[in-house]
Every structure is written in structure tokens, then in C-alpha cells.
Image (tube, rainbow, N blue to C red):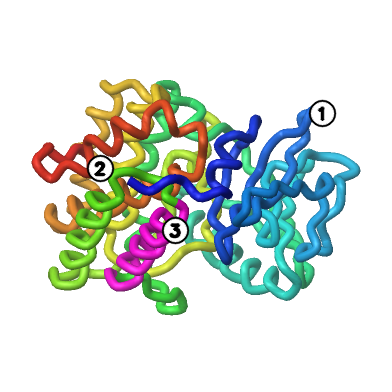
Amino acid sequence: MSAPSAALQALRDLPGVRRAWPGKHGELVLERHDDQGRLRAGQIAPDGTVTMVGFATDPRLPALEPPARGELVVHRLGRRAVVLEPERAVKILRPGRAPAVAEVTAALAQRCAAAGLGAAQVVSATPDTLSTTLLPGRTLHDLGAAGRPGWEVLLERWPTLASQEDTSLSAHGPAQEAQVLEHWLSLVREHGALEPVEALGQQVNQVRQELLEGRADPYVLLHRDLHDKQLLWDGRTLSVLDMDTAARGEAALDLGNLLAHLRLRVLQGMLPAALAQELRPRLRDLAADLGASPSRLALYTRAAALRLACVYAFRPSSASWMPRWLEEHLDARAPQQD
């Protein structure tokens, strides 16, 4: 049994942590709220030293500054920040990154509209900022059982979006998904973030082998990070967030990710088990309509469940449910739930 790295132990001892991610060279980056309730970004060195940067400042995001109005809601140190203003959302990125994101965002907003789904419209862009329209509604995650009508719209309209041809999008196939899973496993090993890591490694290797050796399904348009926090419902329109991650790949990737998140939300107490049970077969039917075979859907669901274990291993709030999640997904003898 390996002990947590000094950086991870310092993270677990730090109050008010909202999210955290592994960084380079054994570091961790994090978000937490300060005594004034403001979102602050920081990093933890490999020796466990915690450094919090000033509010809404970032050496690698020179366009970021304390907002005159609105609220800083995302700040991943050195990567990106998001400020929600009364009438728009502003993404702050590294210099030179915003124009490409703006181009993809605008193109995918049109595709969403054609499918009857909402998406952010580009208002303006600079080399390091992207301003978009502010989408109405609350996430299906926050709505819980009250989000049922939003799920109905997703089931009805997602096939229209996913079926659209777009050769400009890059491919994210089995090899790329296997690389993502292996990368997260390496970070868990580096920080001693989960036990038993041997069982985790065995499951990841098995999924990797099946991803690469199995027959891939036809490619469709993918969100690539589709889950309940990416979907907003205002009672009339279902809107999709962060479409700039779109790619082409197997439909089972998006639908498997949704299925894994359904199980997670039930475990977290965020979604009634009865609603999740109702949605599962309908999501499977949706996947089949998009050309996903049952075996590939089950495989991508397993991949998503293992990746979620790795991602949430760096979020102290997962301590209450992580043992049960690992018990369900690391025991090869246990029935795999989706």
C-alpha cells in the first residue's frame, strides 16, 4: 500500500477545496473559496507547500483580472478561467488560444440549433478571451428529479446532433480514449491517490486491450465530455455547454459517459435511483440508434467509471462515496452497473 504524495496529503488537509487537478512534475493545482467567498486558484508543490495566487490573477492568463461586475466561477491555474457577467460569459485562455475555440464554438452552436438544442453564441473574441451569450437554466445535475423534462429533450434531440456530418472535427477513437485512461492511471500511481492501485491497473489494462482490439462502431459527432453538468434546462430549451471539445468517435463514448455519471449521481445522492433506472434503458436505445453495439457501450461505460475514479481521487469531497465506487468497479466478479 503506497502512501499519498506530500502534495496530495496537503490537498486533503486543506479546507474549502472545490476542485483539484494533477499538474506537471508532481504538482497539484486547485480551486478553493477564501474567507470572503471568492474563488481562488492555487498550487501545491511536490513537497506539500501550498501557494494561493491573488484573487482573479494568473501569470499565464494575463487577461484575467478581478471582474468589475459578475462572478469568477472557474479558475484552473495556468489554463483557463470563466467569469459570468449579467448578460454574457467570458472565458479567459492563454494568449493566442481563444480564436480557435471561438471558431469551433460558433460552428457547433449552429449544429446544436439545427438539432433543436441551445448552445452559447459567440459575441466577441480576442487572442485570449472569448465572450459568449449567457445560457438560461440550471444544470440537470442541480435539478435532480426536477430535470426529468430536460432528459426527455436530450433523448429526443441528441440523435439529430450526433448524426450530423462534420469532417472538420478531429477523431477521438479507441486509441485516444485508451491514452486518456492510461494517463489518469499514471497520475493516480504518481500521487498514491487510490488503493488498491493494482486492481485499478488491472481493470484499466483490460479496458485498454478491449478498446484497441475490439471492432469499433461507426463514428458520429461527439461532445467528448457529456454529462449532467454540461446540460442546462430552463423549462423550454435544453442547452449544451462546452461544445468546443467536440470530436468524431464512437457514440458509445458520450452515452457511456452519461450512463457512468447516472450511477455516480445516485451514489452521491444527487439523483433518485428510480429516475436513473428509467433513463438507463432509454440511453441504451439511443446509443443503439446511433450505431453503438451493446458490447462497446458497456466497454465505454466501464472506461468512464474508471476515469471518474481517477479524476475524483484528487477531490477531497469524494471520500464519502469513493470506497463504494471502487468496490463496484474494481471487483471483476461484481456485476458492472451502468
Name the quarter where the N terminus is drawn.
top left
Crowding at mark 3 (Cα within 10 Å: few <14, some 14-19, many 20+): some
Q: Which residues are magenta?
A: 174-191
Whether residues under marks 1 and 3 lie with C-beta atoms below 8 angstroms apart, the answer is no
Q: Secondary structure at mark 3?
A: helix
Q: Which residue occupies 66% across, 61% down? A: 79
Determine the secondary structure under disc 1: loop
Q: Residue furthest bottom?
A: 167
Quick one: 77 or 287, which is closer to the camera?
77
Q: Which residue is mark 2?
A: 283
User: How busy is the neighbourhood of tag 1: few (under 14 within 10 Å), some, or many (20 plus)?
Assistant: few
- Distance CA(mark 1)–CA(mark 3): 34 Å
Q: Amino acid at mark 1?
A: Gln
Q: Is residue 163 left or right of residue 167?
A: left
Q: Secondary structure at mark 2?
A: helix
Q: What separation in Å lies between label 1 and label 2 (alpha carbons)?
A: 42 Å
The residue under label 3 is: 190
**Residue 197 percent across, percent down from the top left:** 30, 50
